[in-house]
Image (spheres, coloured by chain):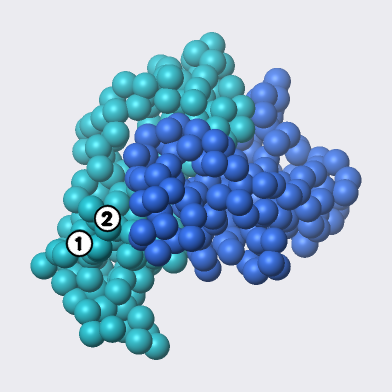
């Protein structure tokens, strides 16, 4: 069951409505090189392999590569858009196991692996990851969130 | 028949070893609305908590908040002495964030970076140096709002990657 907070259009995700095995709604990103330049500027990460084709090709890549931290940001969005504004993100772990490139879709996915109440707080552990267009998980991770419970 | 030998010389010199536990100079940032909006636009996250103040207030936040990985834009200061990076190329290995409370527009956040571990591995790219850093983010009231444990990997020789010295 989802309900809406008064004054907002964000449905509240309740702890009581989450079950182990639930899948998070996927977030699909279609990054282009412009987004990489925007991210370089916004994060001040000016490692050239993310915007300079020559540097990327000399390093043996077909084109520039996506910042790992941008993939973390997408996985953060996957989780925060799922929990809505009443939930809280407590932990976010991301590992960059393989490189991803722009101009090909990247899919962020997640699954609930554990739910528990600790000190009256509803905690949910999720396994998350980013999958490339060939179906390989390049960027696995996990997150821990707290969700409101319906009895308080 | 030649068998590849693991190099018995470590790249982790005594000088490099002396960086373990060393803290960077504290850097303090005012969290400005436009910086948060620009970051949210750059990552492509249209969550109104980052751009619509009325929405953020009605959702029980006192003000606009920053996206969870906004911390990446708050660069730490330098170390008290120059870090002797032995390699030319850099890879980001990953990050682990722990959040105690959201960062709000109007906050003042102080970041300090501390190297907590240095170790090497030998792989197809030769010797790789793993640097584990813990970044702490403290607000204007002295509360630790978040930490990020970041692993960076450096390897190879040649012309240094531009930007490598920022990490």
Question: Could one spot residue A48 in this view of the protein?
Answer: yes
Query: Would you place residue B138 above or below residue A27 in this image?
Result: below
Residue A123 image position (x, y, % from top left): 33, 75
What residue appears at the point 69 percent right and 47 percent down from the top-left corner? B29
Q: Quadrant of residue B11?
A: top right
Task: Return the residue found at the far left.
Answer: A1
Chain identifier, cyan in the render:
A
User: Which residue is tagged 2?
Assistant: A8
Q: Which mark is residue B73?
A: none
- Most foreground residue, B12 or A141: A141
What residue appears at the point 69 percent right and 67 percent down from the top-left corner? B141
User: Are the residues flagged by discs 2 and 1 in contact, CB closer than 8 Å?
Assistant: yes
Residue A7 image position (x, y, % from top left): 27, 58
Provide the chain ID for the residue under circle 1: A
- Cα separation, mark 2 vs mark 1, equals 7 Å
Query: Would you place residue A65 above or below residue A5 in this image?
Result: above
Chain identifier, blue in the render:
B
- Most foreground residue, B59 or B124: B59
Query: Would you place residue A100 above or below residue A144 in this image?
Result: above
Q: Quadrant of residue A87?
A: bottom left
User: Which residue is tagged 1?
Assistant: A4
What residue appears at the point 39 percent right and 88 percent down from the top-left corner? A119
Residue A126 image position (x, y, % from top left): 30, 63
- Look at the image and tell me in which quarter the C terminus of chain A lies: bottom left
Question: Could one spot residue A61 in this view of the protein?
Answer: no
Element under disc 1:
strand
Q: Are marks 2 and 1 on the same chain?
A: yes
Judged left or right of residue B159, residue B48 is left
Judged left or right of residue B74, residue B9 is right
- Most foreground residue, B28 or A78: B28
């Amino acid at each position: 069951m989802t309900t809406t907070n008064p004054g907002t259009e964000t449905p509240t995700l309740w702890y009581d409505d989450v079950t182990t095995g639930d899948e998070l709604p996927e977030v699909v990103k279609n990054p282009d090189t412009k987004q990489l330049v925007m991210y370089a500027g916004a994060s001040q990460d000016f490692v050239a392999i993310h915007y300079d084709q020559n540097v990327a090709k000399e390093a043996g890549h077909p084109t520039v590569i996506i910042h790992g931290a941008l993939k973390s940001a997408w996985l953060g969005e996957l989780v925060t858009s799922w929990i809505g504004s009443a939930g809280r993100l407590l932990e976010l772990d991301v590992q960059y196991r393989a490189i991803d490139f722009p101009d090909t879709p990247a899919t962020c996915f997640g699954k609930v692996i554990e739910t528990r109440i600790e000190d009256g707080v509803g905690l949910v552990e999720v396994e998350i990851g980013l999958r490339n267009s060939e179906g390989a998980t390049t960027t696995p991770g996990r997150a821990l969130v707290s969700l409101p419970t319906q009895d308080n | 028949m030649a068998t590849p030998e693991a190099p018995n010389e470590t790249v982790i010199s005594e000088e490099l070893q002396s960086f373990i536990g060393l803290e960077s100079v504290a850097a303090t940032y005012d969290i400005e609305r436009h910086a948060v909006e620009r970051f949210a636009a750059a990552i492509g996250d249209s969550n109104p908590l980052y751009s619509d103040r009325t929405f953020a207030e009605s959702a029980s936040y006192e003000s606009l908040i920053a996206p969870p990985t906004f911390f990446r834009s708050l660069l730490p200061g330098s170390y008290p002495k120059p870090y002797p990076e032995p390699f030319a190329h850099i890879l980001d290995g990953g990050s682990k964030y722990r959040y105690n409370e959201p960062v709000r527009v109007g906050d003042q956040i102080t970041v300090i970076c501390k190297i907590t571990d240095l170790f090497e591995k030998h792989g197809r790219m030769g010797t790789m140096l793993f640097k584990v850093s813990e970044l702490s983010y403290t607000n204007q009231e002295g509360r630790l709002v978040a930490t990020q444990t970041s692993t960076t990997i450096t390897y190879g020789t040649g012309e240094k990657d531009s930007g490598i010295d920022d990490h």
